[in-house]
Amino acid sequence: MNIYTRIYLVLAVITLITYLSGFHRKKWYGKMVILHLVLCLTTTVTAIALIKYGHFRNNLFVFHIATPIEYAIFAMLYANVIVNSKLKKYIIYSIPAFALLCILFFLVVQPLTVNNSYVVMIESIIMVGLSLYFLRQLLLLQQVESLNSFPMFWICVAILFYFVGSLVIEGMLNYLMRHSMELARKTYRVGYIFKYLLFLLFIVGAFSSRRQSKEAA
């Protein structure tokens, strides 16, 4: 296990403890963040264990399974906080549609032994769009007095940055793997920055939630 993965796992565990230890674990956004963190830890540990202890040569199928689950978690998060009822329905309907798309892609385009970059890029585009829409909703409807003390603002910004990074990295990765594995590895490591940022902004959201509860009290 390299240093980048160790930092990733440590940050994921710290973020999970932060959300489990506060009142926000009862909030919808808190439940979705916790589910995502559990998914991240499970996926990473399973992928490592398959290579190290299971003697698998390829563990990419784990990420094929994790991608539609990740999409479902974030889609349910946004479906709960977006006001537009029509868009809510589209988001909910998109969950099984995206799962079917993932199955179609691994059957026809990118098999389980190949990095599922196309599906991840589609997921990233949708999530960036939903994140921007929610931020627009916050600004137009002025739902909160202070964005700094609103947990969903930080969670949304975290998701936005994470998927912008994912879109860029995945967009280049398969091309680089065909031309230079060394450059592809370096690019993949850069992707850890966006994963770290996701967890750090989640933590900021958790503490902003605590400030909000103290102010309300």
Image (tube, rainbow, N blue to C red):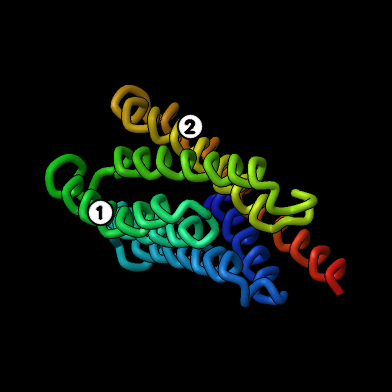
Label 2, label 1: how far apart the Cα atoms are: 30 Å
Of tags 2 and 1, the one toward the viewer is 1
- The foreground one among 188 and 14 is 14
Which amino acid is tagged 1? Ala
Tag 1 residue: 97
Task: Tell me if mark 2 has few (under 14), some (14-19) or many (20+) residues whose alpha carbon lies within 10 angstroms of its own.
Answer: some
Residue at disc 1, secondary structure: helix
Figure quadrant of residue 89: bottom left
Tell me which residue sits at (67%, 71%) in the image.
24
Give x and y (percent) for residue 84.
Answer: 47, 51
Tell me which residue sits at (40%, 35%) in the image.
170
- The foreground one among 90 and 63 is 90
- The foreground one among 179 and 153 is 153
Tell me which residue sits at (69%, 58%) in the image.
151
Residue at disc 2, secondary structure: helix
Give the vertical position of 157 relative to 206 (above or below): above
Give x and y (percent) for residue 125.
Answer: 41, 38
Tag 2 residue: 187
Which amino acid is tagged 2? Thr
